[in-house]
Image (cartoon, rainbow, N blue to C red):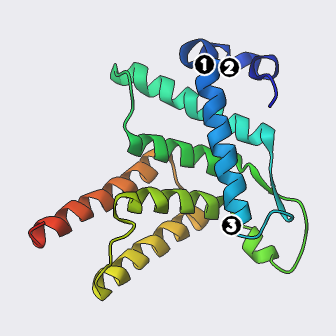
Amino acid sequence: MKNIESIYLNYGELLEEFGDDVISSRYAFLYEEAEEFLRSQGMTGEVTVNEVLMMHAVLDYFSDVSRLKKFHHIHHINEIKVVAYESFWLLRRKPLQVCAQGQQDDLLAFVNEKFVFSRIAAFLVKEHKNLVLKQEDKKSFVNYLDTLYYYLKYRQYDPQMLELMILGFKAGEIWGGQKEGR
């Protein structure tokens, strides 16, 4: 990995605030997640992770986190905000780049959206991934995911909208649990 400070001199304040180790580890984590996603989708030869765009996504994420923490006078942001702001900047910077043309061109057109969608979906089900859903719940969940993916592909989004979609899902989980006496 390249030396962050020598490439992004205008991000010097972020390096002071968060430290090179924190930023580098977030970059490495997201880069590995992207690589694993590409392997799992069989896209390794057709799509690559652009290091510069990934680094910009990471640094822009930390820039937003810094502003949030200062504005709200807090030391940490919650995990929903983390997912929402990471997702936004991954969608905005589009670090997954198509490098080969093939029969799957239409599938590759939204590779960044599909990557972010998979990250959000994994976050939403992480506590319940072994849960067996009733048929009507499964249908509602699939509808929610379809709508989320559609929004990532075709609608205007910002970090707050992504945060609200995740919060809405979490509220639905709580409400559904209350109705069933969980």
Q: What element carries label 3?
A: helix
Quadrant of the image occupied by residue 57? top right
Q: Where residue 14 is drawn, which disc sits there? A: 1
The amino acid pointed to by label 3 is Ser
The amino acid pointed to by label 2 is Tyr
Q: What element carries label 2?
A: helix
Residue topped by disc 3: 40
Query: Residue 139: x percent and y percent?
Result: 36, 84
Q: Is mark 1 on a helix, strand or loop?
A: helix
The amino acid pointed to by label 1 is Leu
Name which of mark 3 and mark 2 comes first in the sequence: 2
Image: 83 above or below 44: above
Classify residue 52 as left or right of residue 75.
right
Label 1–label 2 contact, CB within 8 A: yes
Quadrant of the image occupied by residue 143? bottom left
Query: Residue 169: x percent and y percent?
Result: 33, 61
- Nearest to the observer: residue 161 or residue 35: 35
What residue is shown at x 80% (from left), y 46% (from top)?
50
Q: How busy is the neighbourhood of tag 3: few (under 14 within 10 Å), some, or many (20 plus)?
A: few
Q: Where residue 11 is drawn, which disc sits there? A: 2
